[in-house]
Image: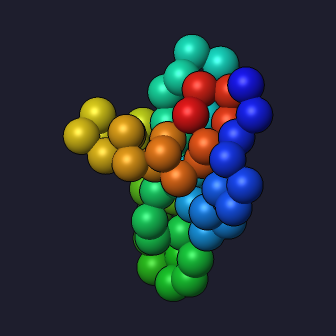
Amino acid sequence: MRRPKGVKTKKSVAKRFKITATGKVLRSRAGRRHLCQGKSPKRRRRLRAEALVHPTDEYRVQQSLIYSHRG
């Protein structure tokens, strides 16, 4: 089915979120951009992992990513 003309992916959302093959939405954790020398290596390792978006926000993210395979 064709999408209506003018419907676009929100590029700001596309840069921040990723959708898995099962349809879950991943986000990166906050706190990795700067001031990392003051954080312990264990804390920096934990920040490296991606986190799941809360189910209440998942629908809004998927609506912004309309061309994703699950959106």
Question: Which residue is situated farthest in the left direction here?
Answer: 56
Question: Which residue is situated farthest in the bottom direction here?
Answer: 35
Q: Position of residue 18 (x, y in %)?
A: 62, 42
Q: Position of residue 4 (x, y in %)?
A: 67, 47
Q: Position of residue 56 (x, y in %)?
A: 24, 40
Q: Residue at x 31, y 46 (%)?
A: 57
Q: Residue at x 46, y 79 (%)?
A: 38
- Quarter holding residue 5: bottom right
- Quarter holding residue 32: bottom right
Q: Quadrant of the N terminus?
A: top right
Q: Is residue 48 left or right of residue 4?
A: left
Q: Is residue 4 left or right of residue 64?
A: right
Q: Residue at x 38, y 48 (%)?
A: 60
Q: Quadrant of the C terminus?
A: top right
Q: Residue at x 37, y 39 (%)?
A: 59
Q: Nearer the viewer, residue 71 or 58?
A: 71
Q: Tell me if I can see residue 3 in this picture.
A: yes
Q: Position of residue 21 (x, y in %)?
A: 65, 19
Q: Nearer the viewer, residue 33 or 25?
A: 25
Q: Tell me if I can see residue 47 in this picture.
A: no
Identify whether 56 is placed above or below 35.
above
